[in-house]
Amino acid sequence: NGWGSLRRAIACSDINDTLRISPQLPGQTVVLNNAIVIDKNLNILQSAGSMFKIEATSTGPVFNILSGNTLSLSNLELYSGTGFSGRAIINAGTLNLNNLKIYEHTSMPLNGSVIHNIGTINFFELNEIKK
């Protein structure tokens, strides 16, 4: 939540900004205690060939995209939390996925999914959803 955090970078970004994850951080993991709310159009990417991990705790998803907003994600790994609000992503806007790996938490309910979608999802390149 502090200076230099992903949450702070998103909060300080302007509409349509691109946040680039430092190439010195591949393989490192950010653990979120609650969802990052996306209330503007935003791009978040890591350099091709390296992955940056973002993990939700059991209390919520990684991202909650509000209606009318677009989130584009590239070259990231997302790990879902558990329970309905523990999805990896809750999307009411537009979600663009490019070379993303999404991992379902092993204790996820059988009737759930890693993305709760009532908006639009666009898939580009290779994307994987794994348990």
Image: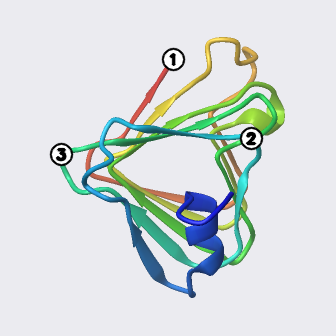
Residue named by callout 3: 49
Q: Nearer the viewer, mark 1 or mark 3?
A: 3
Residue named by callout 1: 131
Residue 73, position in %: x, y?
44, 58
Question: Pointer 3: residues within 10 angstroms few (<14), some, or many (20+)?
Answer: few
Q: Amino acid at mark 2?
A: Asn
Q: Residue at x 74, y 71 (%)?
A: 67
Q: Earlier in the sequence, mark 1 or mark 2?
A: 2
Question: Pointer 2: residues within 10 angstroms few (<14), some, or many (20+)?
Answer: some
Q: Nearer the viewer, mark 3 or mark 2?
A: 2
Residue 53, position in %: x, y?
44, 39
Residue 63, position in %: x, y?
65, 53
Q: Residue at x 81, y 26 (%)?
A: 83
Q: Is residue 93 left or right of residue 51?
A: right
Residue 36, position in %: x, y?
69, 57
Question: Pointer 1: residues within 10 angstroms few (<14), some, or many (20+)?
Answer: few
Is 112 placed above or below 75 here? above
SS at mark 2?
Answer: loop
SS at mark 3?
Answer: loop
Residue named by callout 2: 33
